[in-house]
Every structure is written in C-alpha cells, then in structure tokens.
Image (tube, grey):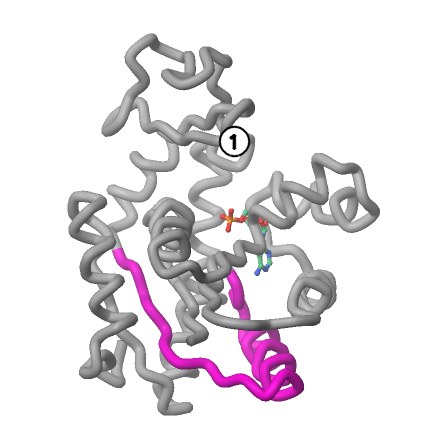
C-alpha cells in the first residue's frame, strides 16, 4: 500500500508516520528528514536546500523530485510519504514515478489542527541530537529541563521552528500544499481526514483504521 500523509507543520506527521511505519513494517519516507540528512552530510543538495529550509520556504520541486526518484529506485511493500508531495508539480511527479514502478497511490491521510495549536507545538518542540528522541516543553517535557531522558544530551530547537519561520511555513502549507486535497479527491484517491489535536495514541489508532479499514475515504477530505 502507498499512503500520503498530508498536514500542516507541527501536526505530528513525523511522529505518527514513523509509528505507523514501524507498526506495519512499512517504509517511512520523510523528505524533511532526507533533506536534514543531506545537510548533515554536507552534500551539494544539502547545501542548496539550506537557505530555503531556514527561511521556511519550500525547496524547489526539481531538487525534491530528483531526491525522491533516487530513494524510490526500488519499491517493495508499503510506503508512507511524510511531507511529500507538497506542491502540485510534486504530486504529478510522484504519479509518474509510481507509474514507472507499476504502483498506485492507495490513500491520502490529512492530519489537521488549528494554527494556534500548531504554533504552540512547534515553538515548544525540542529534539535530542544524540538519539533523535523528540520532546515538547509544553506537552511532553524531559524530566531534566533541556536534557534528553535517554542519553543526557542537550536538546536542540530546530532553526525553522522559530516563530517567524513557523508562520511562513504555515502560510506555505495553506497556499501550496492544501490544494493537493482537492487534487487527490478529484483523482478519486480516497482522502481521509484525522483530527491531529487529540492524544497521540488516539491519533495513531484513527490513522491505522483509516489505512487498514475497508471503508476508508470520504472522497472530500
Ligand atoms: P518538514 O520536516 O517536513 O517540516 O520539512 C522541513 C523543511 O524541509 C520544509 O520547511 C521545507 O523547507 C523542506 N521540505 C521538506 N519536504 C519538502 C518538499 N516535499 N518540498 C519542498 N520542500 C520540502
């Protein structure tokens, strides 16, 4: 099965996508994670993506599509796309890649929450650079302020989670990514909306139902 997880920044796509992938033994393909990895490794792509990411803008479609094509040379089993596609050209590009692989998109899941909730979540988000565990100073703080419970490393705040950049990222989502919901609905791909402003376990449960249930899809988002 191939599923796209859509939703504004901060709604929990990364956490929920990773959990779903682990549960179902699927591949979790997050373009944000891939780009951060390129930056860490200092690749040419990472260097080109840096300024767009730090401003909260989208990285150009061609760079993203090349990166995704590279990742999808082989595609067995289930995949959950997280943070991709984010524009109509990316959605069309994904269609072509899947066509070439003889695969089809099965579902689009939309995680939603109000902007107010998203801003608070993103501004409170912290990550351990050592083990990758994430925290939120408002909702899920570490026991020892500023340090990871698992490995004791000092937690970091993503540069693109500062308030101005967060506002840009939300605008970019509403302008460029949200129209994909209508695009997929009109292409008759089942679109299921899940309320992202609920306890994490409940969100995960609804996502799993939406993915594995027979009656998934309201066709409207
Ligand atoms: P994320 O972790 O998904 O919030 O992505 C972090 C940043 O990486 C975004 O704000 C964009 O600058 C960039 N990015 C990630 N995925 C994409 C994509 N599919 N298209 C364009 N830019 C992306």
Residue hosting label 1? 158
Name the residue at 73% across, 65% down: 70
Q: Nearer the viewer, residue 157 or 3?
A: 3
| Direction from residue 128 to residue 114 in the image, left or right | left
> Does the magenta segment cover residue 71?
no
Q: Identify the magenta region.
A: 84-112
Name the residue at 77% across, 50% down: 45
> Does the magenta segment cover residue 88?
yes
The number of callouts visible is: 1
Q: Which residue appears farthest toward the top when viewing the image?
A: 144
Name the residue at 29% across, 12% down: 143
Ligand 1 within 8 Å of disc 1? The answer is no
Helix, strand, or loop for circle 1?
A: loop
Q: Residue 181 occupies which quadrant of the picture?
A: bottom left
Residue 156's x, y, as percent? 50, 22
Placement of the C terminus among the 4 image quadrants: bottom left
Q: Which residue appears farthest toward the right when viewing the image?
A: 44
Q: Is residue 210 above or below residue 133?
A: below
Q: Nearer the viewer, residue 100 or 121?
A: 100
Q: Nearer the viewer, residue 91 or 127?
A: 127
Placement of the N terminus among the 4 image quadrants: bottom left
What crowding class fits label 1: few (fewer than 14 Cα within 10 Å), some (14-19), or many (20 or more)?
Answer: few
Residue 33's x, y, as percent? 57, 46
Name the residue at 65% across, 55% down: 59
Q: Is residue 87 above or below residue 146?
A: below
Q: Residue 7 occupies which quadrant of the picture?
A: bottom left
| Direction from residue 114 to residue 148 in the image, left or right | right
Residue 141's x, y, as percent? 29, 21
Residue 183's x, y, as percent? 43, 83
| Direction from residue 88 to residue 122 in the image, left or right | left
């Amino acid at each position: 099965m191939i599923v796209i997880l859509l939703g504004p920044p901060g709604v929990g796509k990364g956490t929920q996508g990773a959990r779903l992938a682990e549960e179902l033994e699927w591949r979790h393909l997050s373009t944000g994670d891939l780009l951060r990895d390129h930056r860490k490794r200092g690749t040419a792509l990472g260097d080109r993506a840096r300024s767009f990411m730090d401003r909260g803008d989208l990285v150009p479609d061609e760079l993203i599509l090349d990166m995704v094509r590279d990742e999808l040379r082989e595609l067995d089993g289930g995949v959950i796309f997280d943070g991709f596609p984010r524009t109509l050209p990316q959605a069309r590009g994904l269609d072509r890649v899947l066509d070439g692989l003889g695969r089809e998109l099965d579902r689009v899941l939309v995680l939603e929450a109000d902007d107010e909730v998203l801003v608070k979540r993103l501004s409170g988000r912290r990550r351990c650079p050592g083990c990758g565990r994430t925290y939120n100073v408002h909702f899920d703080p570490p026991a020892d302020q500023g340090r990871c419970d698992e490995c004791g490393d000092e937690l970091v705040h993503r540069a693109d989670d500062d308030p101005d950049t967060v506002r840009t990222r939300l605008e970019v989502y509403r302008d460029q990514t949200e129209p994909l919901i209508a695009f997929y609905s009109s292409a008759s791909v089942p679109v299921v909306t899940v309320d992202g402003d609920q306890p994490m376990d409940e969100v995960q449960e609804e996502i799993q139902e939406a993915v594995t249930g027979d009656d998934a899809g309201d066709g409207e988002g």
